[in-house]
Amino acid sequence: MLHVLAVDDERPALEELVHLLREDPRIGRVTGAEDASSALRDLSRMLVEGERLDAVFLDIRMPGLDGLDFTRLLTGFAAPPHVVFVTAHDDCAVTAYELGALDYLLKPVRPERLAEAVRRVACACARTGPPGEDAPDAGADDEMIPVELGGRTRLVSRRTVTHVEAQGDYVRLHTADGGYLVRMPLTALTKRWEAAGFIRIHRSTLVASAHITELRFDGGRAAVQIGDALLPVSRRHTREVRDLLVRRFHHAADGAGDGGGHA
């Protein structure tokens, strides 16, 4: 069963699209969003929580971030969903297909035409598997997290994140350029980013192990140095952090020894 996201800034059009999609027996779940920025947040949450998203059915002309810009931003994700445009404008089809859209539907949407678009999505998923199914779960090259900044949407690279702090229902991503508040649970982010070298050092703190420069002990308490920040390590996580850094040190030493042997 397909899991899809419908995006349209006009509520009646969105409700009609969601209704038609839910009528299709090949679709198991439909999520609706009234603008592209909300859709990006929904997509990010789904990916972080390990949910599958097969396709996005979206309008083009929307205030703020439009459908074409949204699709361009999708290229920043490790496993972007397939895209089907549903619009009243016929002048963007060439650009849409250049961006990799599977289909381009004109409003008002005819049920049989929408069914054909769903068929194309199902066939694409059958050929390649659902987006992200065969991908190493965000542990490969990078992942982009959309954040809201004064009405604009910015993509923050996971590579630039040094550590993450839980703040209620949100997490704050810390980078060299500053902090970014994102609505998502720290537990889900920990699970998703574990393969990328992120490690929990406290119930409210997740760090990128590659950015740890020092492990300190003072009066039985441990802390790690990341840039200018000294972050406390809970007793529960101290041994795990210490063992990780020891393994990293030995790996680096072995690599240096191998290099010396070939000199």
Image (tube, grey):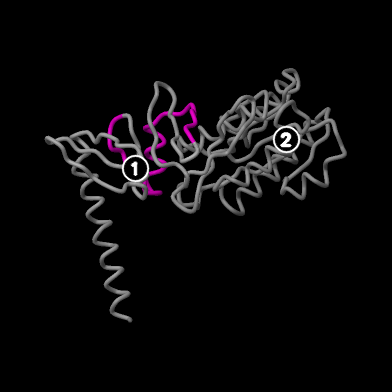
Between 114 and 163, the one lying in front of the other is 163
Q: Residue furthest left?
A: 219
Q: Quadrant of the C terminus?
A: bottom left
Q: Residue furthest top?
A: 12
Q: Is 107 covered by the magenta stretch?
A: no
Instruction: Say which amino acid is labelled 1.
Output: Ile
Which quadrant of the structure image shows residue 161?
A: top left
Instruction: Write the start and end of the magenta stretch as one range.
Output: 178-203
Query: What residue lies at 18% left-to-right and 34% top-to-bottom?
Result: 235
Q: Is residue 162 left or right of residue 90?
A: left
Provide the residue designation for mark 2: 67
Q: CA distance from mark 1 to mark 2?
A: 38 Å
Query: What residue lies at 29% left-to-right and 76% top-to-bottom?
Result: 260
Q: Residue furthest right?
A: 91
Instruction: For label 2, count other residues whose C-alpha is less than 10 Å away and answer few (under 14), some (14-19) or many (20+).
Output: many
Q: Position of residue 9 (x, y in %)?
A: 72, 23
Q: Is residue 203 left or right of residue 154?
A: left
Q: Position of residue 207 (x, y in %)?
A: 35, 40
Q: Would you place residue 255 above or below residue 78 in this image?
A: below
